[in-house]
Image: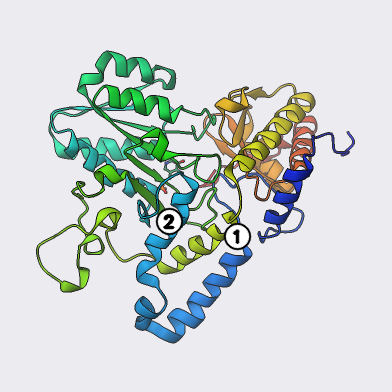
Amino acid sequence: MSDRPTYPTGPRLDAIFTATRALFDLPEGLVYLDGNSLGPLTHAARARVTDEVAAQWGAKLIRGWNESGWMDLPREVGDRIAALIGAPAGSVVASDSTSVNLFKVLSAALEMRPDRRVVLSDSGNFPTDVYVAQGLLARLDRGHELLVVEPEDVADTMAARGAEIATIMLTQVDYRTARLHDMADLTRRAHDAGALAIWDLAHSAGALPVDVTSAGADFAVGCGYKYLNGGPGAPAFVYVASAHAEAVRPTLSGWMGHESPFAFDLGYRPGPGIDRMRVGTPPILSMASLHAALAVWEGVDMADVRARSIELSELFIAEVERRCPELVLESPRDPQSRGSHVSFRFAHGYAAVQALISRGVVGDFRAPDMMRFGFAPLYVTPRDVVRGATVLETVLRERLWDRPEFTQRQKVT
Ligand SMILES: *Cc1c(COP(=O)(O)O)cnc(C)c1O
């Protein structure tokens, strides 16, 4: 099939995102549709990490904590992320992993609703969130119940059992299907029932417009290494609504969350507001990489990001369905109900993705049979999308997935 562009080229969006793509250090010729799992390197992060290693750590050693701004970096990174999720400055801090941050906010939420015993989640949640809740509830040993319902049953469950629910704990964009929860609506229902609302924004932050303030979210967490491009294992973030910021009593009460870490008092006193969600010494190289990577969002309007994301994902679905009729779309067909990735089911999905990668198109695979493709507008172009669909067509038509070298499962899928 010809590679002539058949996509709608919005010239305004093309200009914006041609400029942002130039900020990324992507391998030549690679079609990267996996930024929802690990965002690519930016030129800014490459330069910053090099500088932090040589000119800060290398040259300044311990003085770096004061002279290189290391101590304030978690808050500065937090403020850059806050701007992307509709949070006021000073309400987000970068620290730890999403899993650990979820533990922090879930334990805080349960303490704020001591007479309620149910945590409501759904089967589309990312497993680590569910595991963390299972571990915490078991350790509390106070008769809590983790209720995991189907995503479409969350609202009805709140209506039926609202008085028992301490908090809802949901991921806004389903990591497999990209189904999008209505954060404002479910949060309002939770509040109407007297419950709190915790949102995992791992596949939302940097992917679509998010407004934790107007949605009324009580707590939110999310990843720094997906759409925010912080690098492998980059710190995650945690948001606490200002109404709770001075009331939260951290369970992980570490010294970096203390009001005065260098007083070395033996009694814990929580730091002001969001600072108390910090625990231990921040990983400065990762934190600096994330801080630099977040500069690519300056001047970018999330409404444009959303428009481009929809343009790209709609184009991909149309191209794939035309070329590969044997594939089944698993994501919602309505783009308004979808995040920024698209999943297709295919029985040989794992091997097909490996074959795609061998031909320079990177997607990923989620068990049992989902091929997943992410469309990060800052660097994915309509041309990439058409190329991805073209190579997928070749992989299927030539049964490349049937080759033994592609069926061997690796540790990370
Ligand atoms: C990627 C992802 C995580 C990952 O958590 P880490 O602790 O950073 O490994 C958590 N939650 C969701 C919804 C995710 O998509």
Gap between marks 1 and 2 measured at Cα: 21 Å
Residue in the foreground of this view, choosing between 175 and 261: 261
SS for dot 2: helix
Whole-percent x and y of residue 290?
49, 60
Counting residues from the start of the chain, the first of labels 1 and 2 encountered is: 1
Residue in the foreground of this view, choosing between 87 and 68: 87
Q: Which residue is at a point 80% across and 35% down the rendered structure image?
A: 7
What residue is shown with label 1?
41
Q: Quadrant of the C terminus?
A: top right
Q: Quadrant of residue 123?
A: top left
Q: Which residue is at a point 75% across and 46% down the rendered structure image?
A: 14
Q: Which residue is at a point 58% across and 23% down the rendered structure image?
A: 332
Q: Which residue is at a point 46% across and 52% down the rendered structure image?
A: 81
What residue is shown with label 2?
79
Task: Give the vertical position of 367 relative to 66 (above or below).
Answer: above
What's the amino acid at mark 1? Leu
Whole-percent x and y of residue 203?
50, 40
In the image as oriented, which residue stretches furthest toward the bottom? 59
Asked if the beta carbon under badge 1 is closer than 8 A to the nearest atom of ligand 1, the reply is: no
Bin the neighbour count of mark 1 within 10 Å (Cα to Cα): few under 14, some 14-19, many 20 and up. Answer: some
Residue in the foreground of this view, choosing between 122 and 112: 112
SS for dot 1: loop
What's the amino acid at mark 2? Asp
Whole-percent x and y of residue 154?
37, 20
- The reply to whether residue 79 is in sight is yes
Q: Which mark is residue 91?
A: none
Q: Is residue 129 left or right of residue 31?
A: left
Q: Is residue 243 left or right of residue 212?
A: left
